[in-house]
Amino acid sequence: MMGAGGIGGYYAARLAQAGHELVLTARGDHLKALKTGGLTVDYEGEILHQALPAFSHTELMQKHEPDDFDLIVIALKSTATAPVMDEISDWLENASVPILSLQNGVDNEPVIAGVVGEDRVLGGLAVRIGGHITEPGHVFAEGVAQVVMGAWPRQRPDDPRVSLLRRLEALFNAAGIPTTVSENIRYELWRKLVINNGVNPLSALTGLDTRSLTHHPEFRKIVHGMMAETVAASEADDVNLGPEDLAEMFDLISNFNAIKTSMLVDKEKGRPLELDSIAGAVLRRCETLGIEAPYTGTVNALLTHSQN
């Protein structure tokens, strides 16, 4: 599990609890705490504690070969994808281990595929989960915590990855992680981006959780507008979301728990924001299509300005 933060830490603890062998990567004080005291996850009051091997990426490459693992799961912030893949590219490129991305945005899988090739890439997303590091070695998570995964960028006829995906689906479900396999993972990734762009940047700008945003008489209009712009932007990737996707995603986030978004947590902790991977991904595609995205553009500009 590369990136044992709020999302990666939760899924790692669930899989370890079910008897799977895992190795974690992290950095800084969180890594030190994982090494000395193990990983503690508070999942809505249920405490999961697992003492698992934890390494920096340099230590991982020194102690293991990629094919020591059946699967590498990347749960890093999307801002870290390119630099980390550069760091571990020589280690990964001559191996055969498949890589599953569980990250925000729609641009992580192409970066990973640029190093290992498309045939080893599984796209994925964490659905209806909120999570963050509360202190070094400790993670809080909440929500249904589903996973959707699939062969990236699409499932081909007789795709050899399908059998692996079915095994992972069964193992994840048996570990208490509700998991499904999609034949069109790019469609699912874009639907997640609709929600992420709708609430993450605005929550970081206002300091409000998702429920406060979606039930506010004015902010809910901005959330809906940013989600609609994301739906329109999907055409640039030939995904072509429609009004039914917009309605479903807006209803989903409006009725979900009051989540403090990962971008708001990052802003409060002074960490880099996944703004370029979320709002930036939408704005670049709208520019390519020659369409306006005033809601996303305005919130992106205000949030960027507030960081300077």
Image: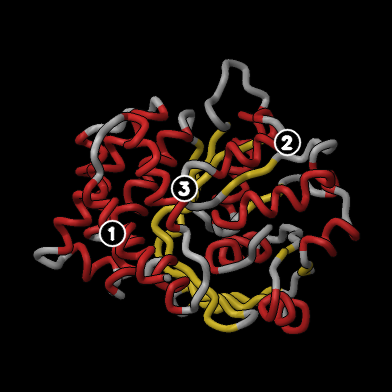
Residue at x-position 23% and y-position 43%: 228
Estimate the x, y position of residue 30 in percent, counting from the top left.
66, 77
Estimate the x, y position of residue 273 in percent, counting from the top left.
47, 64
Q: Which residue is mark 1?
A: 299
Marker disc for residue 104: none
Q: Residues within 10 Å of mark 1 (few under 14, many from 20)?
A: some
Which quadrant does the N terminus fall into?
Answer: bottom right
Residue at x-position 73% and y-position 83%: 37
Estimate the x, y position of residue 165 in percent, counting from the top left.
61, 36
Q: CA distance from mark 1 to mark 3?
A: 17 Å
Q: Which residue is mark 3?
A: 105
Residue at x-position 82% and y-position 60%: 60
Q: Secondary structure at mark 2?
A: helix
Q: Secondary structure at mark 3?
A: loop
Marker disc for residue 116: 2
Residue extending farthest left:
217
Nearer-the-camera pick, 32 or 205: 205
Residue type at mark 2 is Val
Residue type at mark 1 is Val
Quadrant assignment, res 264: bottom left
Which quadrant does the C terminus fall into?
Answer: bottom left
Q: Looking at the image, do the residues carrying marks 1 and 3 touch, with CB atoms under 8 Å apart?
A: no
- Nearest to N terminus: mark 3 or mark 2: 3
